[in-house]
Amino acid sequence: MNVPHVRPHAASGMALALGGAVFYGVNIAYVRMAADAGVTGALMVAWRVLLMAGLAALFAAALGGGLSAGLSVPRRERSAVLATGVSSAAVALCYITSVAFVPVTVAAVIFYTFPVLIVLATPFVEKRPLTPAMIGVVLVAFAGVVLVVGPALGGLDPFGTALAFGASVAAVWQFFAAARAPETSAVAKIFWVQLVMLPAAAASALALGGSLSPAIFTVAPLAVFMTIGLYVVAFVCHMAALTRIAPSAAGLAFCAEPLVAAISSAVLLDERVSALQYAGGALVIAAIVANVRLESRAAASEAAVETAR
């Protein structure tokens, strides 16, 4: 029996999305370590943005063609790159701020409604039909996320809840916007997205911490280095994945992030993982496998149509 294969760019896109989810998930444990040492999330976001923009510029300059060519964005994709930057800033700042008002677990569950919203929005944004199989997969994935995170839903603060849901909506915008700039190189996209994010990140850090001092790197050097380093790798994978696969497929792949976060917290922070969380993890993995199979079938179908032509 012939097994359908994913096209090379689709296979690499799914691998990049899963890689991004893994690096984001491990990153959360180090964020907690840094926070326990007194480093605010907003301050780390500001330095992360600044360093990523600098690294992207250096990498572009090292490539053949010079800095200008390396950071160029086609005119027709500039609005999409701008939208990606604005939405990325909204995701980071809304999500970080929400945990000051509601428990982290609750904020995570609300935020991870974004894969569901992406799938529901796909027929309207991308004019792609919403199949019953895809609806089933996304519901299974979200159920798994809820079990993995295991929130305590009592006494929710309306403002914190609104911020977390705002981060979810911004993530939907981010995924669709980034997918609208397939011709812009990952380096250029990262540079301009970080540049757009910088003012909001710096303002938030000053408002919450009162300083942008590089002393952050001496307070908890390992935690801060790992937080920033893992995020850089995750964001690169994230942006590169969205040039290869549909936002709906990428969004479902990112459901693996809270599962990885739970595992990394257990390993690095000695937090316990319950049987219910293991069950949720199994649901997430099942949904991701089902999503890969759906993408494989779609790719094989497209390849058959192209061959027939």
Image: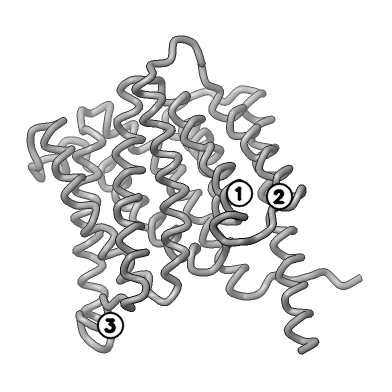
Q: Residues within 10 Å of mark 2 (few under 14, many from 20)?
A: many
- Locate residue 250 relative to residue 24 in the image: left or right: right
Q: Position of residue 269 (x, y in %)?
A: 42, 29
Quadrant of res 72: bottom left
Q: Earlier in the sequence, mark 3 or mark 1?
A: 3
Q: Which mark is residue 63?
A: 3
Q: Which residue is at a point 33% across and 78% down the rendered structure image?
A: 74
Please state the horizontal and vertical placement of residue 279, each as a whole percent of the image. Answer: 69, 30
Total numbered circles: 3
Q: Between label 3 and label 1, give the one nearer the viewer.
A: 1
Q: Mark 3 belongs to which amino acid?
A: Leu
Q: Is residue 217 above or below residue 127?
A: above
* Pointer 1 with pointer 2, Cβ within 8 A: yes
Q: What residue is pinned by disc 1? A: 119
x%, y% of residue 177?
Answer: 42, 59
Amino acid at pointer 1 = Val
Identify the residue shown where x is 33% and y is 36%: 94
At horizontal 26% and vertical 75% (from top left) the residue drawn is 71
Q: Sequence order check: which comes first, mark 3 or mark 2?
A: 3
Q: Residue at x 53, y 48 (%)?
A: 254
